[in-house]
Amino acid sequence: MAVFLALAAGMVLVALPLPSSAAADPLLNRDVTFFSVAQGTYVSTELSYPEGDTGMLRARATAVGPWEKYRIVPGGAAGVYAIWSYAASRYVTAELGHPGNRAGELRARSTVIGPWEKFAIEVSGDGSLALLNIANYKWVSAELSESGIYKGMLRARGDTVGPWEKFRIDGPPKHTDGLTKPVYLIHGFSPIPQVGGPFNPAENCASTWANVRNDFANGATGPRVTGIIHTVGFYTQDSNCDRRLVDGTRDTNLLELGKRMANEIYSFYSQYGQPVDVVAHSMGGLIIREALAGVAAHKTGFPPVLYVEDVVTLGTPHKGSTMAGFCGSLGYQQCKDMTPNSAFLKQLPENPQSVMGTDWTIMGADDDETAPANSAVGVLAQHKVRYPKPQPPGTPGIEHGSFRTLDGSNGYIFKLRWCGNPACGNLSSPDPLGGETTAATESPIYVARLALYYSTAR
């Protein structure tokens, strides 16, 4: 049945028959979407654009609708393809006659397959692909630096395949079981000065994360982490951290640290379509929450997309800390941000998600006086772990710093609640929203490692 589309310019397009081929090529005659890896959005056919740009292909949609549907069809020779836009009922053309920064603009406007409508497709091992226009031998780029109606415009103009030239035909990266992804370890607040101690905040990432790194890579039981592990510093005097967000102080606010963390992950991984995992202690959990929330809200200075598969927070004051309130009275901005009902916490979503979805495991302990359990597990998350007190005789209580030091696979009693959605309760009473509570005996570091491994909500 013919489909008629009235465009803004008044032109009426009539659907043309789709070509067919019996070739045993997994791409041919396949209905697809095109998802820009670096932008984190689907490619749309802009039918409402004015003449000259009508049918422009642009990476800007957050969901798939009629304008985001395409078909890969034969281009007349082996390894050569054309792209059919269902919305426009036209083939996609690289406009090689357009001037300046519109040269090579992709538009769904042709009724026949000519040189400008032919593409080669290079498929990478990570599931992404790149499109090469046969006529000018240029790779198709998503123009992320443009603005207005040209933001994310597709153009055949790239000499090499970089982040802007990478697309997926199955949407964002998918969750997988495994420990091969890069892992970021984010430390927390450096305590206020003690008598005889250093005035300036400082964390030695090598010692702070020593037990975590050793268990993740060499744990006696369970799957081990084989992906690269990054430790993150953000104070001027932090040492032995292989990633530094900023030369900061206790007055560097958490929104700024979240923005820096988001750009760190994007620059090294997300723009290339590589998912990462995060383990964060104490205030570090608020930093990654803000990183994900800022990207989702398109805040100024944040990158366009993040691919964060799993986040584990260890003793994070998700609902604030009264001790931070005391510290805040001394004037430190980070303490003010962590005070219950602070302006920062009020604007922070409880369960922010990356484009691929993010599986949260949040952990708290009744022995932790810095970040009490009702704060550490008091927000929405797919998994909640709470260590009660007392622990068994001979087993130390899990205090605030213990989340980073207690390893091994047994001896520490905890409660677990899991949900297929983020609506888990606080583990202090039966949860009317569903899920289940179990008891087990494993250390915080070991539980964190398992939380990174599993891709499902269980």
Image (cartoon, rainbow, N blue to C red):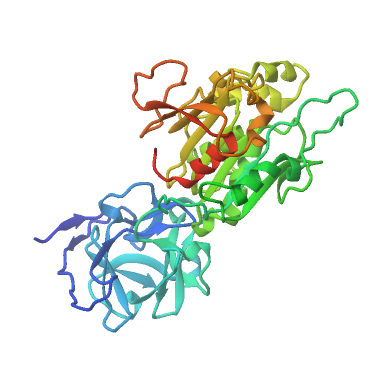
Report x, y in % for residue 78. Answer: 30, 83
**Residue 439 position (above or below residue 33):** above
**Residue 251 position (above or below residue 178):** above
Q: Residue furthest front?
A: 393
Residue that appears at 70% across and 28% down: 334
**Residue 70 position (above or below residue 369):** below
Image quarter of the N terminus: bottom left
User: Does residue 375 appear in this view?
Assistant: yes
Image quarter of the C terminus: top left
Report x, y in % for residue 308. Answer: 50, 46
User: Does residue 8 appear in this view?
Assistant: no
- Residue toward you, 9 or 178: 178
Query: Which corner quadrant of the image does residue 400 belong to?
Result: top right
Report x, y in % for residue 431. Answer: 38, 19
Q: Residue furthest right?
A: 196
Residue that appears at 65% across and 18% down: 369
Q: Is residue 395 left or right of residue 71?
A: right
Report x, y in % for residue 205. Answer: 73, 43
Q: Residue furthest bottom?
A: 77
Residue that appears at 70% across and 44% down: 210
Q: Is residue 246 left or right of residue 458?
A: right
Query: Which corner quadrant of the image does residue 290 belong to?
Result: top right
- Residue toward you, 263 or 92: 263
